[in-house]
Image (cartoon, rainbow, N blue to C red):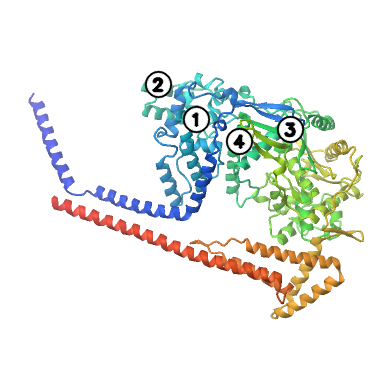
Amino acid sequence: MAKRKDIQQKKQHEAIDNKKSRGKKQGKLTKATKISLSVLAVMLLVIIAGTVFFFQRYGKEVTAAIDAGEEHAAKIQESDFKQHYPTTILDANGQVIKELKTQERDYMTYKKMDPLVSEALVAIEDRRFYEHHGVDTQGLLTVAVNAATGRGIRGASTITQQLVKNIYLTPEVSISRKIEEMVMAQALEKRFSKHQILEYYLNNVYFGHGAYGINAAAKVYFGKSINDTTLLEKATLVGITNNPGIFDPTDNKKNALKRAKLILKQMSTQGYITKEQYDQAIKDDFTAKVHQNALNNQLDNNEVALAVDSAAKVLMGQQDFRFQYQFDSKEEEDRYNEEYKTAYNKVYQRILSGGYQITTNINPSLHDQLQGIVSNVMNTWQDRGDNNFYTKQAAMTVIDNQTGDVVASIGGRGEEGNHYNRAFLSFRQPGSAIKPLVSYAPAYERGLLETSTISDDRPNNTYPNNVYNASKGTLSLRNALAISSNVVAYKLASENRDELKEPIYQPLAQMQFTGLDVTDDNPIIAVGGMTYGATTQEMASGIATLVNQGNYRTPLNVQTIKRKDNGQEIFNQNDLAQQKVYSDDAAYLTIDTMKAVHQDPGGTAAGLTLDHNKYWAVKTGTTDEAKDLWTVGATPYYTVAVWIGDDTPQPQDNAIVGQATKDIFKQTMDLLNNGKEDKDFQMPSSVQNVNGQLITRSSQTKEVLAARKNALQAATTDIDTLAKQKANELTTAKLDTPMVSEASTFSNQLISDRIDTLSRFEIIITDTQDNWQTFDQYAQQVLALIQQVEPSGGSLSDQYNNVYRNKEAEYTHAKAEQNSALNHVSDQIQDAKDQSKDLDKQIETLKKQLEEAD
């Protein structure tokens, strides 16, 4: 008893001592408190300065994004999330050839779904989901501070924001996209209940392996409905939404299990499950595997597969996805590819989920005939691999040159179960078939002619060998393409880059070749040495661009797309704009040069004839060890690109397999052109036949510009003398040669175009950039050209002066605005510093008061 009493007295004394100690601590600021108050003051200053910076830098973007968000929000409909109509694919005759209705089968309402599913989602993704109205204000502050401190546009998104991003927006990371997302999320919360939003999210999010919606995912991974899964399996499925690759329960079970247990922990902490439920769940295990037959998404028709792919890209464009085909770095390329994959999968799922009517130009009868040609020619090779598919495969794309439509997409030999469409999915090295697009057409752009000559001697070992392993000396461009000289193609590609001041693959990027890599700006691609390669669809669209006088048309087999819920037509192929890639004359000269490939006795397609056409162009292609063999070509009516090779590249018998590509090409062209008028490709007005030689406007312009360049180099100080001299030269040229007169007029147009470029030059004035000097240097170059043509002034001089004065005024105004803005920001930062000083003084005063009280 005495001992217990002593212990009680000791505790009482300790309590009194602790109370006194607390009293002393309250009377004097501790060091920890001082640090905390100082940190608070610094944070206040950072937030004030960050907010000022944020709105100063992003103010205009924020305003535009808010407007865009409100505009998109007004169009939100319930059918955007829940489709009641299957997607139908119609052929050219309006007959249904495929119905897609994934969501109709697997969609599960909130009321029918086990509450634990949505509770798991809220616990891990948005614990304040039931408190906010679409945007978590803490998240908004995080975005602003991250932007101000240079850490990117980052910040936690609510479930509602994620739903908006999944359905309506591309994965682009920018302040404007983030603001737009927030505006739409708030609008969504006004339209729908929290339970509806959870329902829409869980039925539309991607879970990997083609599964969209959690019920579909449960069937894919566990072979049962979501309501029949265990608590651990539910948590595992919810965890996948964060990153389907990292948390894939089949390929990355360790990661998936770790995240599932984290979700269970959050559910227990937040009161969604009991301790007993939690303890049992973390003891459980799961076995996940991909059940291939869980989803009926198999597109077993090559033409339908292309139609869905085309429709997906159309919808991506309508969501403002920025398609990109060339990159400045590998990091940029990888980042884009990831964004593309995410955006593509999202819209692809929307199509599979239902709600669209896609009208195509698919002709099932024609497809069967063309598939028959490919299959019959390939019957020579019967070897099959472990998957029981033919080892040697073929692919072909046919484009209608009048419309630009893909009329046939033959993705393989047609054996049962092999649904992979190599025509638009398989990238293969194009070999010499790429030469017209990257070597010859750009060379004709810069003024060369078919009769222009070049040596096929290898200057050093960096140049590729010719296929004939020798040098034939000086060749005309027409003959060089006919015999497929690798050295000439390599030289032309290198010269094109130097003179045109653009990447060698620039025209390919303009024609949306999707396999381009940053390393492909290399003359070796002129002989097919690409990093990834090209598809038959891309090769066909490239040659079709030449036939279409240099105008590129996106290759699609889709005519219209309509929403089924309201009948609105959201796409019409006739509304697609064409893009100018090559000049009219360069495109025509290239097609004409390709005729030599079968007309010249030494051409690589000599002996190949078509039954119904006299006027046609062709190019063959063979890669190292003949692993890939091509024949691509066109009549005025159709373009055809054929490839043969093994799915896993292997050396081929060049003679036999190469002949097979020509046989498929010939039989296809004979079938398509039968009964059509035998006419030549349309010659543009910029090309003239002078004494049997095709002369182009580009070649005449080249001569005029070369003469001017030489004159400029010869001139030293007397610009007036030079101007008079050039004026006399031009006058004489106009009197003596009509063609040169036309070229001179064309040159004036070029100068007018440069003045127009000046007028569209964007003056950029920021705290770190001022591009006036760049503008002024270019303007002086344009002025020098004008003075040659108009030494005494004229319309070009007047245009130039107006543009220069306007840009000068624009620069002065922008500079003044920038200075004013900087002064304003400086004042606000100074105010923030003053407020911080006042806070420091208040802290010091409080400190003294507390010390005096002590």
Looking at marks 3 and 4 on the same chain, the residue that comes earlier in the sequence is marked by 3
Q: Which residue is mark 3?
A: 303
The span from disc 1 to disc 3 (Cα, nearest Å) is 37 Å
Q: Residues within 10 Å of mark 4 (few under 14, many from 20)?
A: many
The span from disc 3 to disc 4 (Cα, nearest Å) is 19 Å
- Side of 789 relative to 326 (left or right): right
Q: Identity of the amino acid at label 1? A: Ala
Looking at marks 2 and 3 on the same chain, the residue that comes earlier in the sequence is marked by 2
Q: Which residue is mark 2?
A: 277
Task: Name the image quarter holding the N terminus.
Answer: top left
Q: Nearer the viewer, mark 2 or mark 1?
A: 2
Q: Identity of the amino acid at label 4? A: Val
Q: Residues within 10 Å of mark 3 (few under 14, many from 20)?
A: many
Q: Are marks 2 and 3 in contact (CB under 8 Å)?
A: no
Q: Are marks 2 and 1 in contact (CB under 8 Å)?
A: no
Nearer-the-camera pick, 586 or 84: 84
Point 69% across, 33% down: residue? 358
Looking at marks 2 and 1 on the same chain, the residue that comes earlier in the sequence is marked by 1
Disc 3 element: helix
Residue 821 shows which numbered tag?
Answer: none
The span from disc 2 to disc 4 (Cα, nearest Å) is 38 Å
Nearer-the-camera pick, 413 or 402: 402
Looking at marks 1 and 3 on the same chain, the residue that comes earlier in the sequence is marked by 1
Q: Position of residue 391 (x, y in %)?
A: 76, 31
Looking at marks 2 and 4 on the same chain, the residue that comes earlier in the sequence is marked by 2
Disc 4 element: helix
- Side of 84 relative to 156 (left or right): right
Disc 2 element: helix
The span from disc 2 to disc 1 (Cα, nearest Å) is 19 Å
Q: Which residue is mark 4?
A: 347
